[in-house]
Image (spheres, helix red, strand yellow):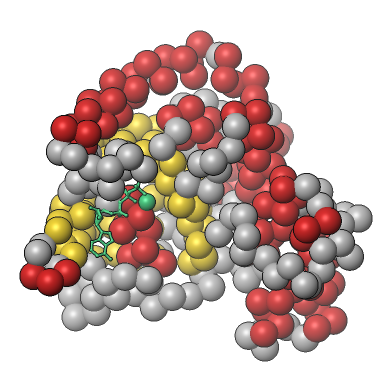
Amino acid sequence: MNAMQEASALKQRLTKGAIRIDDVVKTYDPDGAAVMAVDHCSLDIAAGEICMIVGPSGCGKTTLLNAIAGFHSITSGAIYLDGEMLCGPGKPMAEPSSERIVVFQNGALFPWKTNLENVAFGPMMQGKLSKKQAHEKARAMMADAGLSGTEHNFPGEVSSGLRRRVEIVRALMNDPKVLLFDEPYRALDSLTKSVMHEALLEIYYKNNVTIFFITHDLEEAIFLGHKLVIMTTRPCRPKKILTVDIPHPRDYGVLTSRRFRELMEETSEAVHEEARKAFAAGEKEG
Ligand SMILES: Nc1ncnc2c1ncn2[C@@H]1O[C@H](COP(=O)(O)OP(=O)(O)OP(=O)(O)O)[C@@H](O)[C@H]1O
Ligand SMILES: [Mg+2]
């Protein structure tokens, strides 16, 4: 382990944000037509871990994310954060909280506020920080994320890559334990994606929150994740859970490494098998 990896490992041990998903079932019941989206799903995510969720369209990934965020109830089972029950028996729905933030990438910034004002907005509105404190913290966090010099620009005046950094930093201003991403880079070409990935990791290495990240892109999942969870077709549950044994910090050189290719080979069959099942079952293209 080099010094940077050691520092990162140490930070990781100190970080909070361990998630336990325990035997969760979610059945939607619109008009009495029950749709089971999550089927006895159990999954442990360590504090500071980047957990990547891959699975066919419509299998139930977003349903799970919404349950963690507190946007939707679960039918049975329980979800814990650092041992504390978020939802479970007697409490079907978690309360949304700034300790678990969904990072909406692309379009979630106020266009009429500067980047600095956008980043400072949350804790100021919640009365957690004064304007002065919020602006100081925002400036420091923006500098850390390579956003110095863009504080007084409006979101529309900077590149989309920088805008997405602003969105992540805005979420981090609340000192969350967990960041939740739902296919944030799905519409991007692979070159732009690679820039986004390196930016995300760069920010992550300085903050070490727990990341729950949904994607359809296996390469993205292996590149970013400590852990890769391949979900079954709907109703989802983990089909395969894999530790990505490529050391962090990572950069794009990893993509051409032998281990990376082996992991792609080890996992792509499982992903395709589920995708075929989903297709046969008539789930729509995502
Ligand atoms: N509010 C809802 N009411 C009824 N059914 C729903 C609701 N939300 C989702 N579903 C159904 O639950 C299943 C899982 O949906 P979900 O959005 O969790 O899948 P997903 O894995 O995120 O899919 P995608 O990859 O397309 O984003 C789907 O069959 C979907 O139609
Ligand atoms: Mg989804």
- Where 239 falls versus 184 (above or below)? above
The N terminus is located in which quarter? top right
Tell which of 254 and 186 is nearer to you. Answer: 186
Q: Is residue 188 left or right of residue 225?
A: right
Percent coordinates x, y for residue 190 in the rendering: 59, 29
Q: In this view, does 161 lie to the left or right of 218?
A: right
| Camera sees residue 47 | no
Residue drawn at 56 percent across, 14 percent down: 257
Q: In this view, does 33 lie to the left or right of 244?
A: left
Residue drawn at 15 percent across, 56 percent down: 36
Tell which of 232 and 190 is nearer to you. Answer: 190
As drawn, which residue projects farthest toward the top? 258
Percent coordinates x, y for residue 94 in the rendering: 34, 74
Residue drawn at 37 percent across, 71 percent down: 71
Number of on-image labels:
0
Residue 151 placement: quadrant:
bottom right
Q: Is residue 170 left or right of residue 34?
A: right
| Camera sees residue 115 | yes
The C terminus is located in which quarter? top left
Residue drawn at 66 percent across, 34 percent down: 192
As drawn, which residue projects farthest toward the bottom? 127
Percent coordinates x, y for residue 173 in the rendering: 67, 68
